[in-house]
Image: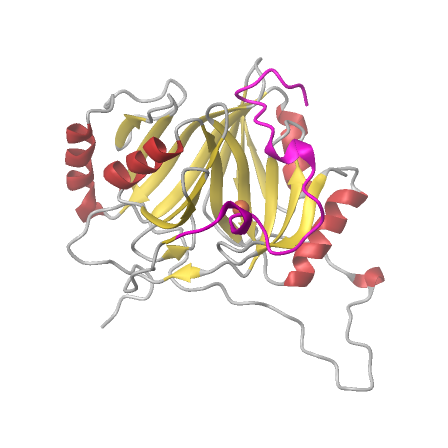
Amino acid sequence: MKNIKNPKRHETQAVHSLDRVVFTVPDLKEAENYYATFGLEVKKRSNAVDLYTFGHNHCWATILPSAEKKKLQYMVFAAYAEDMALIGERIKQSGYPHGQPHPLGSNEGLWVVHPEGFYVQVIEAEKSSPSAKSEPLNAPRAPVGKGNAPARSVIQPVRPRRLSHALLFSAKVAQSATFFSDVLGLRVTDRSDDFIVFMHGIHGSDHHMLGIVASEGPGLHHLSWDVASLDEVGLGMEQMLQAGYTKGWGVGRHVLGSNYFFYSRDPWGSFSEFSYDIDFVPSDHDWMMGNHPQNDSFYVWGPLVPEEFVINYEATDAVV
Ligand SMILES: [Fe+2]
């Protein structure tokens, strides 16, 4: 019988989930406020902030303090126990520096350094990526003859359901994609030459658990969070605008991944995405990878893209 909870593509060894993203910011209190406003469950530790989604016991991201500007420190991917040894072999054979934990990380699992210098950890852990397409949660339609829209006066705060993906800046998009496919077993879903590459996990995953876009250097462009309806994308935007986080992009719809989006700009110039209805790649399905014109790689419809949307504050001297 097919294992619905932990689907496994047989005779392959690859990570199944983007388990956690770890980055540093100059002001943890600001991070707490921003992500609580975004609708995440923010848990404080002595010198760190962990990001959870309400009703889910998985820690999706950890934010640590630093005197420097915001910086991606390391990414944690998770694999099934039976795949760990072979992923370890792949890491050894890859020739990338490996075995040394990130100074801010734990000794658990395997460590390897990405060609652009940030660390990647692989641990054995439960699958936190979705194993089926996330269900919409639309309110029942009012009967014809009655108003169907929710009343603004009674709307509830939007709370994302889970992390969907991370988008990384990179000065070496092709090399970075090769790293993630050779070392971790991620597979390219769609790309636009070497401008942007989207990658999924082969054991069942959103259209992308990881995206890589061309820039001057490495950096974290955005973390994307799954919400339950198109209304929640719009309401998420309202939530941020009303709280004073007025910069962002959307509402719109992507071509590659198909999701509806609103990107809220965080205090450090990167983004948090409310994402609804992203495409899904089941573990028993071979997605036909497409190489798309750059014009199709971004969005179908939406407002004009603000200039700052593509600024990599981690790799340049640009000031937020
Ligand atoms: Fe995204």
Quadrant containing the N terminus is: bottom left
Would residue 31 be found to the left or right of residue 16 on screen?
A: right
Residue 287 at x, y = what percent? 34, 60
- Quick one: 298 or 147, which is closer to the camera? 298
Would residue 115 be found to the left or right of residue 65 on screen?
A: left
The stretch drawn in magenta includes residue 41: no
75 lies above or below 272 = above
Q: Spot the residue most to the top.
A: 67
Number of callouts: 0
Tell me where residue 305 sits by quadrant.
top right
Q: Residue at x 39, y 24 (%)?
A: 118
Q: How is the image coloured?
A: secondary structure
Tell me where residue 280 sits by quadrant.
bottom left
Predominant secondary structure, magenta span: loop
The boundaries of the magenta stretch are 291-320
Residue 105 at x, y = what percent? 38, 25
Would residue 141 be found to the left or right of residue 258 on screen?
A: right
Q: Residue at x 27, y 20 (%)?
A: 100
309 lies above or below 288 = above
Residue 22 at x, y = what percent? 46, 30
Res 266 visible: no
141 lies above or below 68 = below
The stretch drawn in magenta includes residue 302: yes
- Quick one: 139 or 318, which is closer to the camera? 318
